[in-house]
């Protein structure tokens, strides 16, 4: 588990700096049929991206693969994401394990003896 966590942290924290800033396949598909200028602004045509709106969480702390208020923090944002994902997974695992142990203990407990009248 620690090895997997280390690999995830290395990829999120280090390799993320090598990611391309060019639009990915989804962005390119939504722009199909439109003309776009050098700044990425739609200047004509008809495409799906014209109906796009800002996301409700677009201004949040970890929006757009970065950290609000810190430039070039892609790697740090990735490390925070790995840590949060690991913490949530660990909490789910811990809760499931605790529930399983409680069920096993209940099965092994002796049956209550009925009181005599």
Image (cartoon, helix red, strand yellow):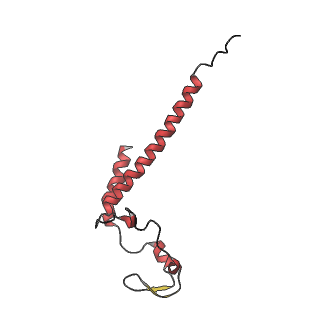
* Point 35% across, 55% down: residue: 80
Q: Looking at the image, can residue 12 be seen?
A: yes
Question: Which quarter of the rendering shows the N terminus?
Answer: top left
Q: Residue furthest left?
A: 71
Q: Looking at the image, can residue 11 be seen?
A: no
* Rendering coords of residue 21 (x, y %): 35, 72
Tell me if 32 is positioned left or right of 63 in this view.
right
Count of marks overlaid on the render: 0
Front residue of 62/108: it is 62
Placement of 52 over or under 42, stated as above or below: above
* Rendering coords of residue 52 (x, y %): 50, 76
* Rendering coords of residue 20 (x, y %): 35, 70
Placement of 74 over or under 53, stated as above or below: above
Front residue of 113/19: it is 113
Q: Residue furthest right?
A: 117
Which quadrant of the figure has residue 60?
A: bottom left
* Point 49% across, 39% down: residue: 95
Tell me if 99 is positioned left or right of 9 in this view.
right
Front residue of 10/70: it is 70
Question: Which quarter of the rendering shows the C terminus?
Answer: top right
Placement of 83 over or under 107, stated as above or below: below
Q: Residue furthest top?
A: 117
* Rendering coords of residue 116 (x, y %): 69, 10
Q: Residue furthest front?
A: 117
């Amino acid at each position: 588990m620690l090895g997997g966590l280390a690999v995830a942290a290395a990829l999120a924290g280090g390799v993320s700096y090598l990611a391309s800033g060019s639009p990915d396949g989804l962005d390119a598909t939504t722009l199909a049929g439109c003309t776009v200028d050098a700044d990425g602004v739609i200047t004509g045509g008809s495409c799906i991206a014209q109906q796009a709106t800002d996301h409700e969480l677009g201004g949040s702390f970890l929006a757009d693969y970065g950290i609000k208020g810190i430039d070039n923090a892609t790697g740090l944002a990735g490390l925070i994401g790995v840590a949060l994902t690991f913490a949530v997974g660990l909490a789910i695992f811990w809760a499931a394990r605790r529930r399983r142990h409680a069920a096993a203990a209940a099965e092994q407990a002796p049956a209550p003896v009925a009181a005599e009248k």
